[in-house]
Each structure stands twice: as C-alpha cells, then as structure tokens.
Image: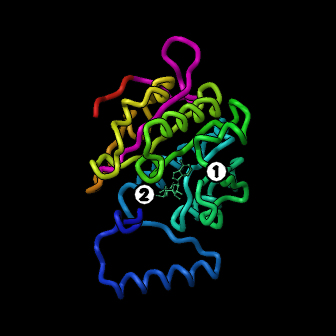
Amino acid sequence: MNAVAARMPKRPWHMRIVARIARNIKALFNVPSFLKNEDRRVLEQVIFPYFLDREACRDVLFVGCDWYTEGYNRWFEEKKNYWTIDADPSNGKYGAKQHIVDRLENVSRHFPAGSFDLIVCNGVFGWGLDARPDAEEAFLACYRCVREKGVLIVGWDNTAERCPFPLSDCQSLRAFQPLVFPPLGTCEYQTDTTYRHTYTFYVKTEVAGPGRARFGAPSGQRDGP
Ligand SMILES: C[S@@+](CC[C@H](N)C(=O)[O-])C[C@H]1O[C@@H](n2cnc3c(N)ncnc32)[C@H](O)[C@@H]1O
C-alpha cells in the first residue's frame, strides 16, 4: 500500500479517479495539491510556519518527495536555501529546484558537515528507510550535515506495520538532544491519526549542558512515548 492510500479514508474507486484527474488538471496550471490529514495539518500549519518565520533558519533539507510535497517547494524556496533529496529518481519531478537523487544515508557525499539548519525526514523511516543499519547511517549522516544548534525532525508512523524498530533504539539519534518544539510544547508529538503519525524533534548540541536550538527553543527531556 502506498503512503497516500494508507493515510486517506477508503473512498470508492470513482472518487479516487476524480481526485486524480483534479490533481492532474491543477498540476497543468501549476497549482499544487496537498493531503488533507491531521498529520499534514500539524506539519504544514504548525511545524513549517515556525521555521519559515525564523531568519536564523536558512538552509533546509526535506527528505522524500511526492505529489503532495511539491507545494512545499514554493513555500520554502521563497524564503530559504531549500534542498530536497529522494532515493527514487522518478520522484525528482516533485523535488525542489535544488534536488538530489540519492539515499539519505549518502547525504554527506553531497554536502559538507554543518550545511543545514533544519532537516525534515518525514514519512521515510518505515517507508523505504527500514533496515536498522540504513537508519543508523542515515541519521548519523543527518547529524554530520546539520550545524551546531540545527534541528532534525523525524516524522514516523507508530504502528507495527510501519515502524521497523523503536526509533528510540537508534544509536545515531542519541548523538542529538531531544528538542522541546515550542509550538507543541513537547519533543515528541503523536498526531490524532489511526496510524499514530508522530513527530520527534532533535537538536544538535556538541557543547555539554542544556542546548538551545538556533531558533531560541530550549532543549528538554523526552516526555515519554
Ligand atoms: C511516503 S513517501 C513521501 C515522504 C514525504 N517526505 C512525506 O512528507 O510524506 C517516502 C519517500 O521516501 C523516499 N525514500 C525512502 N527511503 C529513502 C532513503 N533512504 N533516502 C532517501 N529517500 C528515501 C521514497 O523514495 C519515497 O519517495
């Protein structure tokens, strides 16, 4: 099952065809389409605006592209140095003007250490980034590529089917500190969705002691699963 089918209420086949045609017509006129789910609302209306509004957040990498993420390109490209990356070459058409075709595990081949203020890795863990060694490598590469006080956001489905292993077991993520994301008041936010889509926030603080994100947010302890 693809990501869209998993996240949308089951609709009759003719409704799905109508939706696809509508999407294609919109695409012809350069009008982006979006998914209308609670986890998207949180991502698009709570998480993105926070970072878009912060001047200190300049360099952004978004991992994994599809038709419903294409609209993000315009939002970020207007204000940020925005990059996308996807392992699947066919998804390049949804990517930003600055797009890399490669696995996140290899992101350090494309960017020097400390290149990004923000990496958003949403819907990738459990959706292609599944094997433990790959996830370890990918998040280690993220750690290298975010700068001091930069942020990594991992969006993942907290279900047996889509969570290959507990994210908290990932050693490479332990290099980060948990970040209490101010608009949500927590470092781990589970959305009200059947697939329990969860956003986990991390900040890179190499200096000992409680860290702060570049954007003024204090880091804090995990609130628990
Ligand atoms: C569910 S889709 C879309 C994810 C999108 N970021 C979102 O917000 O929903 C997952 C995407 O991640 C890509 N992907 C999976 N594993 C990857 C990896 N290790 N590195 C880069 N892209 C990967 C897939 O090709 C696919 O386009």
Question: Residue drawn 34% across and 64% down?
Answer: 6
Amino acid at circle 1: Asp
State the residue position of label 2.
Answer: 40
Q: Of helix, strand and loop, which one carries label 2? A: helix
Q: Magenta includes 208? A: yes
Sequence-first tag of 2 and 1: 2
- Distance, label 2 to label 1, CA atoms, is 25 Å
Q: Magenta includes 151? A: no
Question: Residue drawn 58% across and 44% down?
Answer: 104
> Which part of the image, by quadrant, shows the C terminus?
top left
Horizontal arrangement in the rendering, residue 145 relative to residue 6 (left or right): right
Q: Nearer the viewer, residue 126 or 211?
A: 126
Comparing labels 2 and 1, the label whose residue is closer to the camera: 1
**Extent of the magenta region:** 196-220
Amino acid at circle 2: Arg
Where in the figure is residue 187, as x and y percent of width and height? 40, 33
Q: Which mark is residue 102?
A: 1
